[in-house]
Image (cartoon, rainbow, N blue to C red):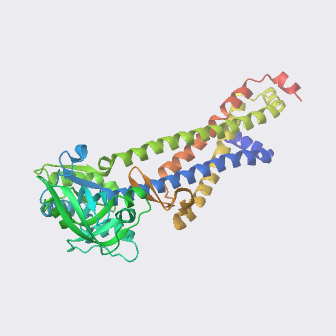
Amino acid sequence: MASAGLFRIAARNLRKNLRRTLITGTAIAGGLALLIWTGNLQEGSYSSLIRRGVSTMAGHVVVQADGYQAEQDMHLLVEDTESAESEVQAALSAVSPDARVASRLLVQGLLQSTRNTSGVALVGVEPSAEAKVSDWHEKVVEGGEWLADDDKQGVLLGEKLAESLEVELGDKVVLMVQGEDEVVHRLFRIRGLLRTGVADIDGFMALATLPAAQAALERPGAATMVTVHLDDPSTVPEVRAAVASALKERKVEVLPWQEALPEMYQFTVLDRQSAQAMFFIIGVIVAMGVLNTVLMSVMERVREFGVMLALGTRPSQVSRIILYEGVVLGFIATGVGLALGVLATLPGMHYGIDFAAMMGENVEVAGVTMDAMIYPQFNWAGTLGSCAVAWVMTVLATLWPAWHASRLEPVQAMRQV
C-alpha cells in the first residue's frame, strides 16, 4: 500500500474518533501556544533589560582605559576624550554613521550637606548627548530640570539620597573625592531629583556634567568610558573591530556590551537556559499525554488491526499508519498552537503587560533597572524551534504504540472484543 493511501487511512482514523483527536490536539496546541507566548514575553524582558543596561551603564561598544574592566579603579581613565570621540566618530562613519557617541566619568566619593554626609556614585555626563542615548532626563522629578551642557555646578541627586542628606532643590552640597594626591572638595547646587524606583540607585547615585566631574577628580579632558550606541545591535562585532582599529595607538580596551556588563549578560544566558529546561519538561509532559492517548487508541483498535493483518497488511504498514496519525495530528496541532501563540503575543506587543503589582514600578536585575511594563517581542528562531520540537515530540510519542501494533498476532487480535 502506497504512503498516500496510508496517510488517508491515518486521517480517517483521526476523524473517526474526533473527540479524542480534539482533546489531544488541544493539549498540544495549548502547550505550544503557552510556550510561544512565554518565550516572546521572556524575549521582551531581555530586550528591555539589555536596552536599559546598555543605554545607562555602558554602550553597545565601550572604550575604557586598559585594565579598567578588571580593576574598576576610577583613576584609570581615557585621556583626551574629545579627540577620542572624534576618532571613534571617524571609525563609525564607514560602518555605522547613525551611531551615537557619549562619554561618561564615574566618580565615587562622599556628598556632604549642612546636616548629613552620604556615600555617592557621581556620574559625569554630556547632557545633550546623554539625552539621546539614555532616559535619565525622563527620571527627573517634577519641579527639577535636566542639566545644561555648560552647567559646572549643577547636580541631580537620587530622591532617596536627597532625603538622607535632608536637602531640597536649590540647596548646596559638597562632593569630597580622593584625587591624585589629596582629597578634593567641590561645591554643587541641586538642580533636580531623580526617581528610578530602585532604592539602591535612588539612594546612592548623582549626575553632573562631564566638565564638573572632571574638575572634581582634577582630570580635565578625561572620562571613564566613551560609549557607542547603535540602532542595530547585530552590528556590534563590526563596529567594535572598526573602533579598536581606529584607537590601536591608545592604551584602551574596546569591549562589546556583553563584556562591559558581564553580570547582566550572564543573567540573561542563565535565565534562558533555565527557561529552556522548563520548556523541555513541559514538552515531555505533553508528549507523555500524547503517548497515553495514542496507546489507548491502539488498544481500542486491536481487533481492527488484527483484521488488517489477516487480510495481508504488513506489520510495518500498520505501524506506519499510527506514525502517520502522529504526523498529521502534530502538524495540525502545531499550526493551531503557532497561530494561538502569535495572536496571544500581539496585544502585549501593543499595550504591554504591567507587572507592577508583582515587582513594583521598577526592579533591579544584575545592577540594571528594568521597567515593570514589559512588551513581548517575537523571537522567531525560538518560536519555530518550539514548533519543530512540539511536532517531533508528538511523532516520537507514537513510536511505542506503533511498535506495539506491529507486534500483534492476527488471530489473537481478532478474538479481542
The front one of 148 and 306 is: 148
Q: How many marks?
A: 0
Residue 238 at what x, y percent from top left? 26, 53
Q: Is residue 56 above or below residue 395?
A: below
**Quadrant of the image occupied by residue 2:** top right
Quarter holding the N terminus is top right
* Residue beneath the point at 60% across and 43% down: 391
* Residue beneath the point at 32% across and 61% down: 116
Residue 184 at what x, y percent from top left? 16, 59
Q: Residue most toward the front?
A: 115
Quarter holding the C terminus is top right
Residue 356 at what x, y percent from top left? 54, 61
Left or right: 254 with respect to 220? right
Residue 182 at what x, y percent from top left? 13, 54
* Residue beneath the point at 74% across and 28% down: 405
Q: Is residue 290 above or below residue 112?
A: above
Left or right: 388 with respect to 61? right
The answer to whether one can see residue 63 in this image is: yes
**Quadrant of the image occupied by residue 216:** bottom left
